[in-house]
Image (cartoon, grey):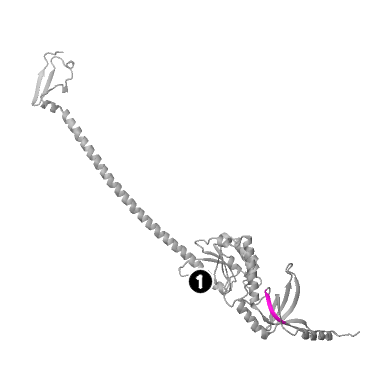
């Protein structure tokens, strides 16, 4: 029986691989690891069972520096983000077996359109799940307060985008006052999801202190956006009790976080501009209300003045009528009194007899010897009672 050393056996295997697999192959896989060392990109490719999601195949791959500089840059330009662990990829490879280091696949090309398609498919699956749960439109149903000035900001403290947001917001041309509080979070890499959720949980505990939440990132080159395309983060944002605005600084298609939020804009400065414009519209609305109210009050005053003038005119006319009627009535009473004046009776030939200055109403009020006065129209007769006849 022939014996081989390990080196001899590996040499035979290398020759067999080189002879039987002397072409390039396009292979679909998932990147479980990716690291760039001295310009070379080292990857671990994995295939998972569709039911259990457990790995059923693994392989090491490398993209040498001369190839990686072109392939990596092309992928980022087309996909809008760099190649990263967790992505589904379609890579062109050929085998390379080394006696000391074993088998690895050498990557000669990567198709970014395949990865874009997978990201779109995954995004659509998340959106479908959110709609099935009935939470997709919850943020859209919330109303931004008219005086939205207390802002909880989720961002990286030293990020250029956060600084741009602060400058734009607090140095606005209207002089509006805003209160902002930063809740720090990782905005790039594998920790994006859990970090933002932790910040939202902290805000939720003090939700009565804020009017809305702004999630922003920006500045520098476009980086990994996959952390904003996760179901768990989308569910947390969708169910959040305050309106959430996003300005995560990217030019490609909207992420799931953008779609699920109350309002999405492209950049942090755009988020600040949106809040300023919202408050400006509120101020304009108040100005219109003030103008309308002033006009309404003025018109009401004019109307009431006209009514008062009408009532005054009517009252004057009514008083005049009453005065005329009462004057006429007094004239009639005066005429009646005049007719009842004893002098009028005397002038018509009648006389009036008095005793002790009082009219005599009956002979029983007289006695013999009383002195009486008889009033006539032209004088008075003084008499003494000699006899009384009944």
Q: Which residue is mark 1?
A: 168
Q: Which residue: 42% across, 59% down?
A: 289
Q: Is residue 88 visible?
A: yes
Q: In x, y percent, where is residue 333?
A: 20, 32
Residue furthest out toward the left: 378
Q: Viewer-proximal residue, 127 or 212?
A: 127
Q: Which residue: 65% across, 69% down?
A: 122
Q: Which portion, as a residue range, is magenta?
A: 87-93
Q: In x, y percent, where is residue 308?
A: 31, 49
Q: Viewer-proximal residue, 37 or 70?
A: 70
The quadrant of the picture occupied by the C terminus is top left
Q: Does residue 111 sit above or below 341 in this rendering? A: below
The quadrant of the picture occupied by the N terminus is bottom right
Q: Viewer-proximal residue, 92 or 381?
A: 92
Q: Secondary structure at mark 1?
A: helix
- Residue 91: which quarter of the image? bottom right
Q: Does residue 64 sit above or below 30 in this rendering? A: below
């Amino acid at each position: 029986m022939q014996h081989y050393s390990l080196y001899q056996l590996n040499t035979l295997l290398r020759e067999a691989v080189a002879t039987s697999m002397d072409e390039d192959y396009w292979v679909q896989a998932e990147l479980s690891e990716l690291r760039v060392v001295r310009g070379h990109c080292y990857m671990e490719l994995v295939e998972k069972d569709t039911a259990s999601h457990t790995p059923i195949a693994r392989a090491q791959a490398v993209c040498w520096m001369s190839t990686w500089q072109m392939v990596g840059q092309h992928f980022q330009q087309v996909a809008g983000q760099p190649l990263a662990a967790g992505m589904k990829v379609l890579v062109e490879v050929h085998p390379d077996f080394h006696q000391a280091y074993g088998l690895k696949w050498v990557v000669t090309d990567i198709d970014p359109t395949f990865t874009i398609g997978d990201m779109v498919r995954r995004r659509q699956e998340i959106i479908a799940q959110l709609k099935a749960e009935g939470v997709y439109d919850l943020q859209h149903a919330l109303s931004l307060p008219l005086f939205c000035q207390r802002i909880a900001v989720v961002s990286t403290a030293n990020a250029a985008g956060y600084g741009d947001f602060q400058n734009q917001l607090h140095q606005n041309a209207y002089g509006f006052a805003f209160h902002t509080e930063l809740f720090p979070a990782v905005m790039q890499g594998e920790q994006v999801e859990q970090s933002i959720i932790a910040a939202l949980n902290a805000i939720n505990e003090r939700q009565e202190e804020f009017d809305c939440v702004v999630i922003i990132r920006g500045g520098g080159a476009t980086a990994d956006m996959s952390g904003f395309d996760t179901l768990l983060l989308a569910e947390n944002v969708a169910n959040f009790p305050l309106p959430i605005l996003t300005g995560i600084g990217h030019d490609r298609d909207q992420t799931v976080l953008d779609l699920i939020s109350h309002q999405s804009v492209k950049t942090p400065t755009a988020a600040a501009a949106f809040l300023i414009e919202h408050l400006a519209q509120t101020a304009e609305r108040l100005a219109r209300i003030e103008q309308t109210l002033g006009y309404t009050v003025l018109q009401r005053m004019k109307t009431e003045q006209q009514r008062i003038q009408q009532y005054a005119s009517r009252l004057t006319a009514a008083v005049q009528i009453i005065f005329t009627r009462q004057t006429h009535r007094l004239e009639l009473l005066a005429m009646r009194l005049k007719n009842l004046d004893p002098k009028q009776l005397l002038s018509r030939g009648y006389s009036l007899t008095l005793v002790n200055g009082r009219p005599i109403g009956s002979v029983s009020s007289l006695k013999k010897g009383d002195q009486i006065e008889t009033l006539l129209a032209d004088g008075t007769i003084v008499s003494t009672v000699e006899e009384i006849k009944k």
